[in-house]
Image: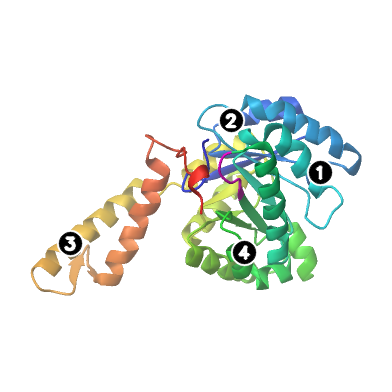
Amino acid sequence: MDVPHGARRRSVLSVPATDTAMMARGLVSGADTVFFDLEDSVPDGLKDRARANAIEMAPAKPPGTSLGMRINAWSTRWCYRDLVEVFEAVGDHFDYVVVPKADSPADVTGVAGLLGQIEQATGLAGRTLIEPIIESGAGLLAVRDIIASSPRVFSVVFAPEGLDFAADMHFLDGVDMDYLNATAIAPLAAARAAGVSLVDGPYVALYDLDGLRRTASARFRMGFDGKWAIHPGQIPVLNECFTPPAALVSKAERTIAAFADAAGAGRGATVVEETMVDVASDRVARVTLGRSARVTDAADPVPSGQRGSQP
């Protein structure tokens, strides 16, 4: 089964599970990964319909496409049925589960435990992966423990401008963007320490592509690996913004080559384009090349077989 672990996550398309036509278009949208949303975009009275739609549409996933499902929060009355009904029926077509409002490790371990039982009962190969969303002050304080709570966690979502997070933190409209960006440091550090990806939430102004580009570019520079799309028109912008520019990659290659030459000559530093280059510069350049390799390797954009090899 194709899985998102280690694959491109520049654009992550959220598709409401209330509309099968939208779900079908989402699967062929060109997003790096797609997930069916059973949570916020689905009214309470349509939860059963959304599950039925997910069961109907999951088998339409094209080869090489990474597919997830955002369930309802572990604390709600819908969560267990999201998992049992959908994954018992078509779990082999889903690669990961998005767990919203993850406030503590228990939100992840609960979902992981239930997934494990479903996999045993249905004979699903390997393990379905988990992507928690940090949407509260409690979740932000516990983010490192949340990520470490299960080997199924391969990515985490945190939106500095997220509405649920703003409500929980009592942020008001107009709060300074520098302050909001500072809230991302803990999730970013936790993600890097655990070796998982960090994805930003949606940009809600659907047709403001210039604003989307500014925000996505800022997140890329901060170290985010990608961002949610809530309209197919946002996908090309996100794919561009989260792909390291050719000029940046070229400079990284020159930096690495120059430092290698300097080290070979017994020097600990050199100069590239009037800038001192040392071992720290070499590390930064190698990170840039690593990010580039993850998003430009067209030979295997969504590695297969890893789902079954998760620890």
The label on residue 149 is 4
Magenta span: 125-129
What is the secondary structure assignment of the residue under circle 3?
A: helix
The label on residue 29 is 2
Label 3–label 2 contact, CB within 8 A: no
Neighbours of disc 4 within 10 Å: few (<14), some (14-19), many (20+): some
The alpha-carbon separation of the residues under discs 2 and 4 comes to: 33 Å
The residue that mark 1 highlights is: 81
Q: Mark 2 or mark 1: which is in front?
A: 1
Residue 21 image position (x, y, % from top left): 73, 24
- Is 190 rendered above or below residue 57? below
| 225 lies left or right of 135 | left
Q: Earlier in the sequence, mark 3 or mark 2?
A: 2
Q: Mark 3 or mark 4: which is in front?
A: 4
The residue that mark 3 highlights is: 258
* Residue type, label 2: Ser
The alpha-carbon separation of the residues under discs 2 and 1 comes to: 28 Å
What is the secondary structure assignment of the residue under circle 1?
A: helix
